[in-house]
């Protein structure tokens, strides 16, 4: 248990998101040497009438380079410090969170993971909601090498008719090397469409060396790359490895 105001010889606080309540704020202020923290608004998910969260801006943390937080904590940030690795959890508009990421951290960001929790009322009409077809301004992230987008439904009931995703040239950060994607719907048909998606990204994007995607109720991850003979290679990989990659780039 973290003690408010206590100085510890630690540089990284990993694991689940820690609620940014007053006692934890005291701890963070007493430990400016921290290089990695995982934070969440104490009232998240927000309730009507909940008190405003402590602004992350009020914390110095000059050595911080790796941050995991929810969008409500990230959006008011004015000083990006030395943060180059970012993990954002969002349960609202994916356009808003990417827009804010680019605005605040874009020029310096090397690694980004975003978890989107889609409510049933605003589920994308397309079947897989490919991350390459979303109108994000990735040119504002010229150094971004690693991108992990995890699309999560707020309900497992995903019935209904879906549109067909058009196959267009991938729209991704210009220097991207690794793309990880957790599709919104992974329990329908087979995974050939996602295999084709991985193959297309590897061929369309000059710098992309690997695509990792999640499939099946067991949340298995599959790693895709191109062989020296320009053939698609695929192997199953560990979910725990994929979950932590954003902070290890």
Image (spheres, rainbow, N blue to C red):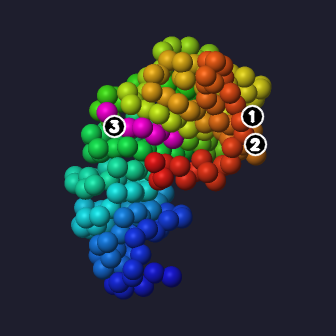
Q: Quadrant of residue 97?
A: top left
Between marks 3 and 1 in the image, the one whose residue lies nearer the viewer: 3
How far is the residue under mark 2 from the one under mark 3?
A: 34 Å
Residue annotated with mark 1: 187
Where residue 17 sits: x, y (%)?
Answer: 49, 63
Q: Are marks 1 and 2 in contact (CB under 8 Å)?
A: yes
Q: Looking at the image, is 191 positioned above or below residue 82? A: above
Look at the numbered disc 1 and give the secondary structure of its residue: loop
Q: Nearer the viewer, residue 176 or 87?
A: 176
Q: Residues within 10 Å of mark 3 (few under 14, many from 20)?
A: some
Instruction: Choose the circle earlier in sequence order: 1 or 2.
Output: 1
- The residue drawn where x is 45% and y is 62% is 38
Look at the numbered disc 2 and give the secondary structure of its residue: loop
- The residue drawn where x is 40% and y is 63% is 36
Q: Is residue 144 magenta?
A: yes
Residue annotated with mark 2: 217
- The residue drawn where x is 56% and y is 38% is 180
Where residue 37 sits: x, y (%)?
Answer: 41, 64
Q: Residues within 10 Å of mark 2 (few under 14, many from 20)?
A: few
Q: Looking at the image, is 197 positioned above or below residue 102? A: above
Q: Is residue 140 magenta?
A: no
**Range of magenta residues:** 142-148
Q: Are marks 3 and 1 in contact (CB under 8 Å)?
A: no
Q: Residues within 10 Å of mark 1 (few under 14, many from 20)?
A: few
Q: Looking at the image, is 70 positioned above or below residue 202? A: below
Between marks 2 and 3 in the image, the one whose residue lies nearer the viewer: 3
Residue annotated with mark 3: 143
Instruction: Choose the circle earlier in sequence order: 2 or 3.
Output: 3
Where residue 26 sits: x, y (%)?
Answer: 32, 79
Q: Looking at the image, is 1 positioned above or below residue 202? A: below
Q: Nearer the viewer, residue 78 or 158?
A: 78
Look at the numbered disc 3 and give the secondary structure of its residue: loop
């Amino acid at each position: 248990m973290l003690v408010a105001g206590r100085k510890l010889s630690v540089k990284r606080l990993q694991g689940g998101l820690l609620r940014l309540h007053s006692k934890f704020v005291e701890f963070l202020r007493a430990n400016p040497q921290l290089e990695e923290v995982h934070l969440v608004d104490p009232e998240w998910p927000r309730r009507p009438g909940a008190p405003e969260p402590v602004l992350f801006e009020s914390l110095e943390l000059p050595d911080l380079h790796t941050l995991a937080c929810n969008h409500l904590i990230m959006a008011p940030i004015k000083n990006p410090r030395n943060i180059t690795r970012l993990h954002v959890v969002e349960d609202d508009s994916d356009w808003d969170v990417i827009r804010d990421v680019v605005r605040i951290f874009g020029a310096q960001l090397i690694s980004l993971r975003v978890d989107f929790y889609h409510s049933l009322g605003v589920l994308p009409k397309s079947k897989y909601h490919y991350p390459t077809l979303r109108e994000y301004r990735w040119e504002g992230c010229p150094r971004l090498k690693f991108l992990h987008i995890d699309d999560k439904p707020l309900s497992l009931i995903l019935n209904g008719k879906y549109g067909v995703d058009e196959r267009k040239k991938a729209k991704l950060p210009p220097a991207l090397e690794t793309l990880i994607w957790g599709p919104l719907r992974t329990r329908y048909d087979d995974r050939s469409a996602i295999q084709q998606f991985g193959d297309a990204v590897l061929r369309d994007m000059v710098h992309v060396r690997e695509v990792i995607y999640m499939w099946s109720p067991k949340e298995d991850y599959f790693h895709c790359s191109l062989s020296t003979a320009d053939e698609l290679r695929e192997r199953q990989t560990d979910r725990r490895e994929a979950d932590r990659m954003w902070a290890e780039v």
